[in-house]
Image (tube, rainbow, N blue to C red):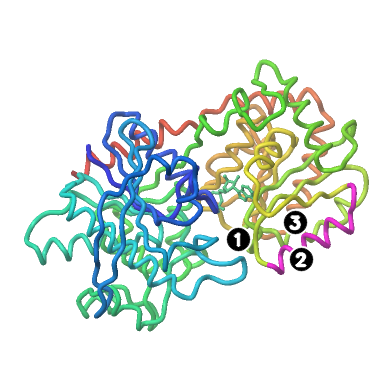
Amino acid sequence: MKIVHAAGELFPYIKTGGLADVVGATTRTLAEYGHEVAVFLPGYRSILDHPDMVNAKRLCSFGVDMGSDIQKGEVLSLNIRKNLTLHLVCRDEYFDRSYPYGRPDRDYDDNAERFIFFSKAVVEVLIRTSLKPDIVHCHDWQAALVPILVRIEERRRASAIAGKTVFTIHNLAFQGIFPRKVFGLTNLPDELLSMDGLEFYGQVNLLKGGILFSDSLTTVSPTYAREILTPEFGCGMDGVLALRSEDLVSILNGIDYEVWNPETDPYLPATYSVSNLKGKNACRRALLLKCGMDEGYTGPVFGIISRFTQQKGIDILLETKDFFSGDRARLILLGNGSTEYRRRSVEFAKANDGVVYLGPRHDEAVSHLIEAGSDFFLMPSVFEPCGLNQMYSQRYGTIPLVSRVGGLADTVVDIGEFPDEGTGIQFPPSDPEAFRKALERAVTLFEDKKKMAGVIERAMKKDFSWKTAARAYEKLYTEIL
Ligand code: ADP
């Protein structure tokens, strides 16, 4: 099949969260299966500066209507590996910036323009290059307009641009909601600015376009697929999603074993496997040292790598100050987020100096060391579409403590409920007391060396490989074509 993906992030070129990892692993695996895969991405400055880009070639220049203006751009293409091409949609005015979506406390004011332009460019390039993909697979609000733009352009030209469109919701909390006036930039028919179209409480909602107008709709875990149909988790879109509930397919994310594998991980001071965990101890010592702690510390080490936002349950974590004040545990935090959360985390670490360590805002290398060197990994999320770190943790023999929501519920088996199958600890979301109990359970488990070893072994043996997810996407594509 000829498959095109359009997204705002792609590992290893640009990443703010799981979207990048997921798009990177899906597209690579589909290419390995022999499909001809192309990924469209905004030409952010950080990608243009990536060493790989010396091999990029100019594919075309183009102009797209943005309201009454014509805006120009160009596409640089890079063959990443066999069957996998990256197309960068470049326009310096929009993408020559330090961050993809905005500064930590504020999104860029022109995000509507930027991503409407990006979506239009994708469709324009498909037309110009006559690529005629079988599937156009779009991710999250940044690319959510592509499915409807494809169909409107096809109608206008009376010729096909693509076979079927697929839209994946990676996180319903981000919808691309903008003032009504930006609708003019889409050049879509006026009737689409209605309840049956992109209109959402008097504004424009780009994600709604993807939900309503794609041929197939997917999300990233079975539990999340059920949750988002409820008012509690639906972020105001449960009614819209109900219209498509019959078409909503869940495909659980996997993890990329080329990037997240303790047997080969180049970021680790020592590699290890389920049959030889010596390297994990070396990673633990290296992590403690890096964080200015005693490398000979014998109690449990907890790690967390997260976007510090309300979604990730950081408030609950910061309420457990006294648990992390004495000598019974160590906590290593790595997180990017708003100035306010950063300030509170800095205070938390300062108040518990030597026990709690706060790392840099974003660091790929440190994130691998935390996964390998911690004994437990914390994910007290309020909601979690899929989550990746709980899977990385299990792969790395680091026991996850997760709230029982979304993909966390689908990928971690609670050792209390299932003593012979358990791979982690679950607790109800948004409940500081339940979280504290989970921490206590972890300490008790840590003291029972035999039981702990059994949980580590089971966790490391679990199969989270991308093959399952990629095959599921392949099957979906085939079914809808
Ligand atoms: P989300 O996409 O909601 O942020 P996921 O669990 O799906 O959450 O994916 C998060 C990804 O981003 C993981 O690969 C995680 O390791 C990475 N990540 C999050 N915060 C940081 C950070 N501060 N430094 C490095 N990597 C991070």
In three-dimensional space, the C-alpha distance between marks 3 and 1, rounded to whole angstroms, equals 12 Å
Could you tell whether 293 is left or right of 469 in the image? Answer: right
The relative height of residue 397 versus residue 148 in the rendered view (above or below) is above
Residue 432 in the image: state x and y as whole percent: 75, 58
Q: Does the residue labelled 1 lie within 8 Å of ligand 1?
A: yes
Looking at the rendered image, the quarter that the C terminus falls into is top left
Residue 317 figure quarter = bottom right
The amino acid on which the numbered mark 1 sits, given as a three-letter code, is: Gln
Looking at the rendered image, the quarter that the N terminus falls into is top left
Residue marked by disc 1: 311
The circle drawn on residue 115 is none
Residue marked by disc 3: 317
Along the line of sight, the residue nearer the viewer: 301 or 70 = 70
The amino acid on which the numbered mark 3 sits, given as a three-letter code, is: Leu
Magenta part of the protein: which range?
339-354
Along the line of sight, the residue nearer the viewer: 274 or 454 = 274
Residue marked by disc 2: 343
Q: Residue at x 52, y 47 (%)?
A: 407
Residue 286 in the image: state x and y as whole percent: 79, 32
Residue 248 shows in the view: no
The amino acid on which the numbered mark 2 sits, given as a three-letter code, is: Arg
The relative height of residue 164 versus residue 253 in the rendered view (above or below) is below
Residue 476 shows in the view: yes
Along the line of sight, the residue nearer the viewer: 372 or 74 = 74
In three-dimensional space, the C-alpha distance between marks 1 and 2, rounded to whole angstroms, equals 17 Å
Q: Which residue is drawn at 41% across and 30% down?
A: 467
Determine whether the residue tagged by mark 3 lies in a helix, strand or loop: helix
Mark nearer the N terminus (3 vs 1): 1
Q: Residue at x 57, y 33 (%)?
A: 260
The relative height of residue 463 versus residue 252 in the rendered view (above or below) is above
